[in-house]
Amino acid sequence: MPELDVHLFTCRSDNYGVLLHDRDTNKTLSIDAPEANAVRSALRDRGWSLDYILTTHHHTDHVEGNEPLKAETGCQIIGPSGEAERIPGIDTALDEGEVFEFGSRQVQVISTPGHTIAPSTYWLAQDNLLFAGDTLFSMGCGRLFEGTAEMMWNSLEKLMALPPDTQIYCGHEYTLSNGEFALSVEPGNAELVKRVEEVRALRRERKPTLPAGLGLELATNPFLRPMSPEIRRNLDMQDAENWEVFGAIRRLKDQS
Ligand SMILES: [Zn+2]
């Protein structure tokens, strides 16, 4: 595979933008467009011109830059078909299992309902990269604005089945507060304790905590761990289904 450059940058208050640049074809893609200015200056910093915006979901803090950037650059906007009518400027709507050709590589669409009704998570298998929008955060997951706990759990299970060395980029820097919450439901998880210490050190220096490796998420993210005996004991849900335990963890986090 020819090299892919990944440029992560902060925008708005706690959003992340990501630019991908395929060196072989000189094509550039923006994962979401949280705000036009931040994407513009990231492009300028790198000397890249925008060819595509790949939208994860319809929330304003992920699509606000779509129309101005499209007007300036003529870029194409690709997004999930189940939210197409709510994504400004969309040109191509893709469904679960469809593939977007980005330069010489393939981006696979995984439909992950829960945070909204039909968001897409994008997987670049050859590069071990996953762009999870607001579905999966490091040590957390998105709030259930439009879907149910069972829907979101089914979505997360699809992501959990990817190779453990997959590197995950998320829409926000929420890792530290997610980690503090995770410790409240699974304080005996030694890997979690260690991970939160590392995250505290990174955030003290204002460094990003992303990307996050899927293997570490499986070991530390309580939303991927409803099968954990410790979490089940703490919630008094020893015999419940995984999605029910997941839902209870989500409700606790909403109240925290
Ligand atoms: Zn969102």
Image: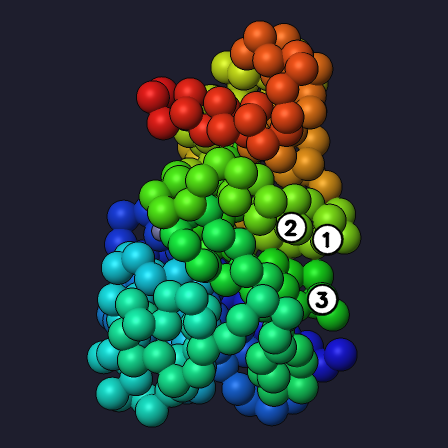
Return the residue at label 2: 159
Return the residue at label 1: 162
Task: Give whichever of discs 3 and 2 has the lower sequence position.
Answer: 3
Residue occupying the point 59% across, 62% down:
110
Is residue 22 among the parts visible in the rendering? no
What label does residue 125 carry, if any?
Answer: 3
The kind of residue tagged 2 is: Leu
Badge count: 3
Residue 75, image x, y percentages: 38, 87
The kind of residue tagged 1 is: Leu
> Is residue 180 placed above or below 164 in the rendered structure?
above
Which one is in front, 15 or 207? 15
Which one is in front, 145 or 52? 145
Residue 256, image x, y percentages: 36, 20
Query: Which quarter of the figure has residue 117?
Result: bottom left
Q: How crowded is mark 3: few (under 14 residues within 10 Å), some or many (20 or more)?
A: some
Mark 3 → mark 1, Cα distance in angstroms: 9 Å
